[in-house]
Amino acid sequence: MKEDVKMYIERAEKFRRNAEFNFENGDYDIAMFHIEQSMQLLIKAKLLDLKGYFERTHNLRKLLSELRDIEGVEEFLKNYRIVLRNLERAYITSRYYFEEFFKEEVEEAFEALENLRKILWSG
């Protein structure tokens, strides 16, 4: 099990690096998608670590709601509800149609990703 958790965390880091590359090149929609993927994998890794499984969904808010017992998650959900909605939209639109995101939205998403990483994996 721990090996699976490690793989999810490593993959999340790869998606974060891809998001940085996309951001630097002005590809904000792809950067948002990669941030969403990174965040999703960090959450799923934590669920695997704590529960041994995770629900088969891509909905970040639903996945995070299963981690409300972790200090900081409830506040994170409250503070980043719009960012989380944007990230969920980025996932859906990357697959089915195009949606434009702006530099500031991506910067907020990077901030959310870093804060979530600290909440779930620092300690």
Image (cartoon, helix red, strand yellow):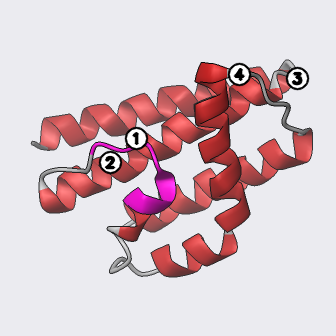
- Crowding around mark 2 (Cα neighbors within 10 Å: few <14, some 14 to 19, many 20+) is many
Tell me the residue that label 3 is attached to.
26
Residue extent of the magenta highlight: 56-63
- SS category of the residue bearing label 2: helix
- Residue 49 image point, x, y percent: 19, 55
Amino acid at the residue labelled 4? Tyr
Labels 3 & 4 near each other (Cβ < 8 A):
no
- Say whether residue 2 is left or right of residue 103: left
Amino acid at the residue labelled 2? Lys
On the rendered image, what quadrant is the N terminus found in? top left
Disc sitting over residue 97 in the figure: 4
Labels 3 & 1 near each other (Cβ < 8 A):
no
Disc sitting over residue 41 in the figure: 1
Labels 4 & 1 near each other (Cβ < 8 A):
no
Distance between the alpha carbons at the discs numbered 1 and 2:
5 Å
Q: What's the residue at 15%, 60% (across, down)?
A: 51
